[in-house]
Image (cartoon, helix red, strand yellow):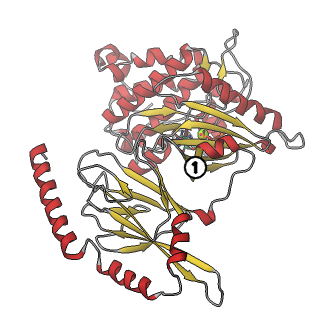
Amino acid sequence: MSQKQEEQDLQQQDKKETEKEKEKEDKTEKEQEEEKEEKNQKPLKKKKEKQQEDQVYGKLISLNRGISSVTITKPKTTIGRSSTNTLQINHPKISKKHFVISFKQRKKKNSEELDYTFKLTDTSSNGVFVNSGLVGKNNTVDLKHGYEITLLNPRQMGRPIPTHRFFFHDLRLVKPLKGVSGLATKYTFCWDLDEGGYGKVSLATHNETYETVAIKIIPKNKFYDPKKEGWQSQKVKYVNEINVLKDLRHPNIIELKEVYDTEENLYLVMEYVEGGDLFYRISDKHKYQEDEARELFKNILETIKFLHDKGYVHRDLKPDNILLLNKESDTDIKLCDFGFARLIPESGEISTKVGTINYRAPETLTVGSFGKECDLWSCGVILYILLSGLMPFHQKRKTPLHQQILWAQYNFPEDVFKNISLAGKNLIRRLIQINPEHRLTAEEALEHPWITGEFEKIKDEMQGIHNK
Ligand SMILES: Nc1ncnc2c1ncn2[C@@H]1O[C@H](COP(=O)(O)OP(=O)(O)OP(=O)(O)O)[C@@H](O)[C@H]1O
Ligand SMILES: [Mg+2]
């Protein structure tokens, strides 16, 4: 849409909205009814209303840098483009009054105690989404603690626009964090992004800048309790993750912003990336088209090359540890989870058995010692999955998984791989090599013809690899 047309649309939209405002003072029927009802509730007189205004009942937590959070203190809180709103968001696609949050107090049944509820009314032209569902013009829905509110649907708008997202807190349900005064005053926790054996990763927002962050919370009893098996190696893992991340600064590596160390937990505050991890993206897409896979894989290899040049080996490369920058891009990445990463010693080898077995190189299963070559094996497995949506090595075969890996026992099923270029298969083959010395390095892989397009270079080698 041209800028001129957009401006015209905007003017028309403004005109329509102004007319409506005149007719109804911008109130929906439901709102008017609710107001009547409020007026009829005589017992809750002005004094109580005054109290209501002073007390904070809820909070709309901004997940957008530069847009502030809003405290809910009044019966009506409005968000929109006009300056008369409680929060003004100046964006052409946002309506003058985009949505309203109504807050209503009632006496609890058979009690003098007061209870309250929150409702959201969509008054926009371009939509309000609560937990990803469209509310719909003039519709009202209940608003509960933990709900996510998104203004406009970026996919529906046809081109990338800034998303405006909020997270709703019913302050009755917010538990204060214990023993982390600095962290608790600086950040507001929103929801959990992932929960695993180690603890969890939560989304939080900075109370002043409204920047979103991901906070990995690691309970110390997991690794400081000598009675628990493996506690020492767990301790090493997280202390290690902190040290490695502090030492690495790269646009494709997750940034560790700060660490909070309390009696109970370790908190790793990291930059937040909103695209989810590659594991989910592959599940959604099933597999990547070859050109997209090439762009993504090149980014992965460049990141690994940087890591190796700095003297580190990641040792746990897999789609779950590769995050995508946003929902729109399938190829821009940030590498995370450096719990197993190590500095490569002079000898070039480290000897502990770590990593997820399906992605592990054979030398890590036998002698248990491995250098940076193990990361390239994992890259080969990842490329196989990207191009086919299948795992090259998996439990469901007759041959035990260990054996499949030790013998590099995999193939390129014709029905799935028939449309994949020979160069792509060749690169997989050059990475999934039993002998680490025969495996391509990250630098060599970046020069492989599948990446560079110089297919002539491997013409002879490619004969007869249709099926390995
Ligand atoms: N910075 C981040 N931004 C967005 N999501 C993240 C971020 N860090 C982690 N996540 C999400 O949390 C998941 C788990 O994080 P991570 O891989 O660091 O821990 P883990 O693998 O469970 O930990 P561990 O290896 O200690 O068991 C990731 O797969 C990803 O989905
Ligand atoms: Mg992980």
Q: Is residue 80 above or below residue 400?
A: below
Q: Foreground: 199 or 398?
A: 199
Q: Across the whole image, how many numbered discs are drawn on residues? A: 1
The answer to whether residue 127 of the structure is visible from this angle is: yes
Q: Residue 28: x percent and y percent? A: 29, 76
Q: Which residue is mark 1?
A: 188
The residue depicted at 36 percent of the width and 30 percent of the height is 294
Q: Foreground: 126 or 451?
A: 126
Where's the C terminus, which quadrant?
Answer: top left
Residue closest to the far top: 346
- Secondary structure under tag 1 reads strand
Q: Quadrant of residue 331?
A: top left
Q: Is residue 389 above or below residue 352?
A: below
Confirm or reject: label 1 Cβ below 8 Å from ligand 1.
no
Q: Foreground: 90 or 189?
A: 90
The residue depicted at 29 percent of the width and 17 percent of the height is 454
Horizontal side, residue 44 vs residue 361: left or right: left
Within 10 Å of disc 1 (Cα), the crowding (few <14, some 14-19, many 20+) is many
Q: Residue 90: x percent and y percent? A: 29, 49
Q: Quadrant of ligand 2?
A: top right
The residue depicted at 41 percent of the width and 51 percent of the height is 284
